[in-house]
Image: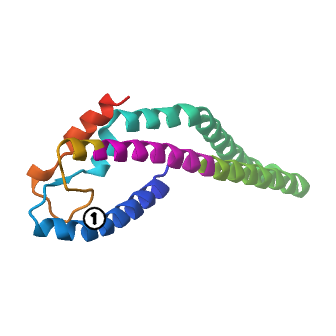
Protein backbone atom coordinates (compact mmCIF):
# COMPACT_ATOMS: atom_id res chain seq x y z
CA UNK A 1 0.00 0.00 0.00
CA UNK A 2 1.47 3.33 -1.10
CA UNK A 3 1.25 6.53 0.84
CA UNK A 4 1.93 9.01 -1.95
CA UNK A 5 -1.62 10.34 -1.96
CA UNK A 6 -1.76 10.55 1.82
CA UNK A 7 1.64 12.24 2.00
CA UNK A 8 0.66 14.75 -0.67
CA UNK A 9 -2.60 15.51 1.14
CA UNK A 10 -0.72 16.04 4.40
CA UNK A 11 1.82 18.37 2.78
CA UNK A 12 -0.90 20.42 1.11
CA UNK A 13 -2.84 20.58 4.37
CA UNK A 14 0.26 21.64 6.27
CA UNK A 15 1.20 24.27 3.72
CA UNK A 16 -2.25 25.84 3.83
CA UNK A 17 -2.39 25.64 7.64
CA UNK A 18 1.07 27.17 7.90
CA UNK A 19 0.12 30.06 5.63
CA UNK A 20 -3.07 30.73 7.55
CA UNK A 21 -1.25 30.33 10.87
CA UNK A 22 1.41 32.85 9.93
CA UNK A 23 -1.14 35.43 8.86
CA UNK A 24 -3.22 34.90 11.98
CA UNK A 25 -0.27 34.65 14.34
CA UNK A 26 1.52 37.87 13.39
CA UNK A 27 -0.70 40.18 15.50
CA UNK A 28 -0.71 37.64 18.34
CA UNK A 29 3.08 37.54 18.50
CA UNK A 30 3.13 41.29 18.90
CA UNK A 31 0.83 41.00 21.94
CA UNK A 32 2.65 38.10 23.68
CA UNK A 33 0.07 35.46 22.79
CA UNK A 34 -0.05 31.95 24.17
CA UNK A 35 1.16 29.62 21.43
CA UNK A 36 1.03 25.85 21.09
CA UNK A 37 2.21 23.33 18.55
CA UNK A 38 0.74 20.00 17.41
CA UNK A 39 2.84 17.46 15.52
CA UNK A 40 0.22 16.21 13.06
CA UNK A 41 2.39 13.33 11.77
CA UNK A 42 2.86 12.01 15.28
CA UNK A 43 -0.81 12.53 16.04
CA UNK A 44 -1.80 10.52 12.94
CA UNK A 45 0.64 7.75 13.92
CA UNK A 46 -0.14 7.47 17.63
CA UNK A 47 -3.77 8.46 18.15
CA UNK A 48 -6.21 5.59 18.58
CA UNK A 49 -8.70 6.88 15.97
CA UNK A 50 -5.91 6.95 13.36
CA UNK A 51 -4.78 3.45 14.33
CA UNK A 52 -8.39 2.24 14.20
CA UNK A 53 -8.84 3.77 10.73
CA UNK A 54 -5.66 2.02 9.53
CA UNK A 55 -6.81 -1.30 10.98
CA UNK A 56 -10.22 -0.84 9.36
CA UNK A 57 -8.58 -0.26 5.97
CA UNK A 58 -6.31 -3.27 6.38
CA UNK A 59 -9.27 -5.46 7.27
CA UNK A 60 -11.38 -4.07 4.43
CA UNK A 61 -8.70 -4.51 1.78
CA UNK A 62 -6.74 -7.54 3.02
CA UNK A 63 -8.82 -10.07 1.07
CA UNK A 64 -8.43 -8.15 -2.20
CA UNK A 65 -4.73 -7.61 -1.54
CA UNK A 66 -4.25 -11.36 -1.00
CA UNK A 67 -6.20 -12.14 -4.18
CA UNK A 68 -4.04 -9.67 -6.08
CA UNK A 69 -0.84 -11.18 -4.67
CA UNK A 70 -2.07 -14.66 -5.59
CA UNK A 71 -2.89 -13.50 -9.12
CA UNK A 72 0.59 -11.95 -9.42
CA UNK A 73 2.20 -15.18 -8.24
CA UNK A 74 0.09 -17.21 -10.69
CA UNK A 75 1.09 -14.89 -13.53
CA UNK A 76 4.75 -15.17 -12.57
CA UNK A 77 4.51 -18.98 -12.39
CA UNK A 78 2.75 -19.16 -15.78
CA UNK A 79 5.40 -16.91 -17.30
CA UNK A 80 8.23 -19.06 -15.89
CA UNK A 81 6.52 -22.22 -17.16
CA UNK A 82 6.17 -20.65 -20.61
CA UNK A 83 9.88 -19.76 -20.62
CA UNK A 84 10.77 -23.37 -19.74
CA UNK A 85 8.34 -24.88 -22.24
CA UNK A 86 8.88 -22.42 -25.12
CA UNK A 87 11.68 -24.33 -26.87
CA UNK A 88 9.54 -27.46 -27.15
CA UNK A 89 6.32 -25.73 -28.28
CA UNK A 90 5.23 -25.32 -31.87
CA UNK A 91 4.94 -21.80 -33.24
CA UNK A 92 1.14 -21.79 -32.94
CA UNK A 93 1.26 -23.11 -29.35
CA UNK A 94 3.87 -20.49 -28.45
CA UNK A 95 1.72 -17.71 -29.95
CA UNK A 96 -1.38 -18.95 -28.15
CA UNK A 97 0.40 -19.12 -24.78
CA UNK A 98 1.90 -15.65 -25.30
CA UNK A 99 -1.57 -14.24 -25.98
CA UNK A 100 -2.90 -15.96 -22.86
CA UNK A 101 -0.05 -14.55 -20.76
CA UNK A 102 -0.59 -11.09 -22.23
CA UNK A 103 -4.31 -11.24 -21.44
CA UNK A 104 -3.59 -12.53 -17.92
CA UNK A 105 -1.10 -9.67 -17.41
CA UNK A 106 -3.63 -7.06 -18.65
CA UNK A 107 -6.24 -8.42 -16.25
CA UNK A 108 -3.72 -8.36 -13.40
CA UNK A 109 -2.73 -4.75 -14.21
CA UNK A 110 -6.40 -3.69 -14.38
CA UNK A 111 -7.19 -5.29 -11.02
CA UNK A 112 -4.07 -3.77 -9.51
CA UNK A 113 -5.05 -0.26 -10.68
CA UNK A 114 -8.60 -0.70 -9.40
CA UNK A 115 -7.28 -1.89 -6.05
CA UNK A 116 -4.97 1.12 -5.69
CA UNK A 117 -7.70 3.55 -6.72
CA UNK A 118 -10.20 2.05 -4.28
CA UNK A 119 -7.63 1.90 -1.49
CA UNK A 120 -6.56 5.52 -2.04
CA UNK A 121 -10.15 6.74 -2.10
CA UNK A 122 -11.00 4.91 1.14
CA UNK A 123 -7.73 5.99 2.77
CA UNK A 124 -8.53 9.60 1.93
CA UNK A 125 -12.04 9.22 3.38
CA UNK A 126 -10.70 7.72 6.61
CA UNK A 127 -7.88 10.28 6.84
CA UNK A 128 -10.32 13.13 6.36
CA UNK A 129 -12.57 11.78 9.11
CA UNK A 130 -9.61 11.48 11.49
CA UNK A 131 -8.36 14.97 10.56
CA UNK A 132 -11.81 16.50 11.10
CA UNK A 133 -12.03 14.87 14.50
CA UNK A 134 -8.46 15.87 15.37
CA UNK A 135 -9.09 19.49 14.39
CA UNK A 136 -12.15 19.59 16.65
CA UNK A 137 -10.07 18.21 19.52
CA UNK A 138 -7.24 20.68 18.88
CA UNK A 139 -9.77 23.50 18.98
CA UNK A 140 -11.26 22.15 22.24
CA UNK A 141 -7.81 21.91 23.85
CA UNK A 142 -6.93 25.40 22.61
CA UNK A 143 -10.12 26.88 24.00
CA UNK A 144 -9.94 25.00 27.30
CA UNK A 145 -6.33 26.03 27.92
CA UNK A 146 -6.72 29.52 26.45
CA UNK A 147 -4.25 29.25 23.58
CA UNK A 148 -4.26 32.09 21.08
CA UNK A 149 -2.55 30.17 18.28
CA UNK A 150 -1.95 26.48 17.61
CA UNK A 151 0.55 25.69 14.85
CA UNK A 152 0.82 22.38 13.04
CA UNK A 153 4.02 23.01 11.11
CA UNK A 154 7.18 24.77 12.18
CA UNK A 155 10.80 25.04 11.11
CA UNK A 156 11.92 25.30 14.73
CA UNK A 157 9.97 24.59 17.87
CA UNK A 158 10.69 25.04 21.51
CA UNK A 159 9.61 21.68 23.00
CA UNK A 160 7.73 23.52 25.75
CA UNK A 161 5.18 24.65 23.14
CA UNK A 162 4.40 21.10 21.98
CA UNK A 163 0.89 20.08 23.08
CA UNK A 164 0.76 16.95 20.90
CA UNK A 165 0.54 14.64 23.93
CA UNK A 166 -2.46 16.56 25.27
CA UNK A 167 -4.19 16.40 21.90
CA UNK A 168 -3.52 12.67 21.47
CA UNK A 169 -4.81 12.01 24.99
CA UNK A 170 -7.97 14.06 24.31
CA UNK A 171 -8.44 12.44 20.91
CA UNK A 172 -8.13 8.96 22.41
CA UNK A 173 -10.63 9.88 25.13
CA UNK A 174 -13.16 11.32 22.65
CA UNK A 175 -14.20 7.95 21.25
Position of the C terminus, as image quadrant, is top left
> What residue is shown at x 11% (from left), y 70% (from top)?
30
Q: Position of residue 6 (x, y in %)?
A: 45, 54
- Quadrant of the image occupied by residue 44: top left
- In the picture, measured across the screen, residue 69 lies left or right of residue 6, that is right
- In the picture of the structure, the residue carrying the numbered disc 1 is 21
Q: Position of residue 95 (x, y in %)?
A: 85, 57
Residue 83 visible in this rendered orientation of the protein:
no
Residue 102 visible in this rendered orientation of the protein:
yes
Coloring scheme of the render? rainbow
Examine the structure image and report whether residue 96 is included in the region drawn in magenta: no
Compared with residue 51, is residue 9 higher up or lower down, i.e. above or below?
Answer: below
Q: Position of residue 126 (x, y in %)?
A: 49, 42
Total numbered circles: 1
Front residue of 156/137: it is 137
- Quadrant of the image occupied by residue 45: top left
> What residue is shown at x 39% (from left), y 38% (from top)?
50
- In the picture, measured across the screen, residue 173 lies left or right of residue 64, that is left
Examine the structure image and report whether residue 127 is included in the region drawn in magenta: yes
- Asked which secondary structure carries label 1, the reply is helix
> What residue is shown at x 27% (from left), y 71% (from top)?
23
- In the picture, measured across the screen, residue 63 lies left or right of residue 35, that is right
Q: Residues within 10 Å of mark 1 (few under 14, many from 20)?
A: some
Classified by dominant secondary structure, the portion drawn in magenta counts as helix
> What residue is shown at x 75% (from left), y 50% (from top)?
107
Q: Position of residue 161 (x, y in %)?
A: 13, 52
The residue segment tinted magenta is: 117-139
Which residue is situated farthest in the right direction here? 92
- In the picture, measured across the screen, residue 108 lies left or right of residue 162, that is right
Front residue of 71/146: it is 146
Front residue of 146/93: it is 146
Front residue of 8/19: it is 19
Amino acid sequence: MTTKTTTLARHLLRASLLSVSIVLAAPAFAQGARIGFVNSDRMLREAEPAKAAQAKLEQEFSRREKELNDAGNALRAASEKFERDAPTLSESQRSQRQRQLLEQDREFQRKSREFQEDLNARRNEELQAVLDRANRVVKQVAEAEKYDVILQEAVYLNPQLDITDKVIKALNASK
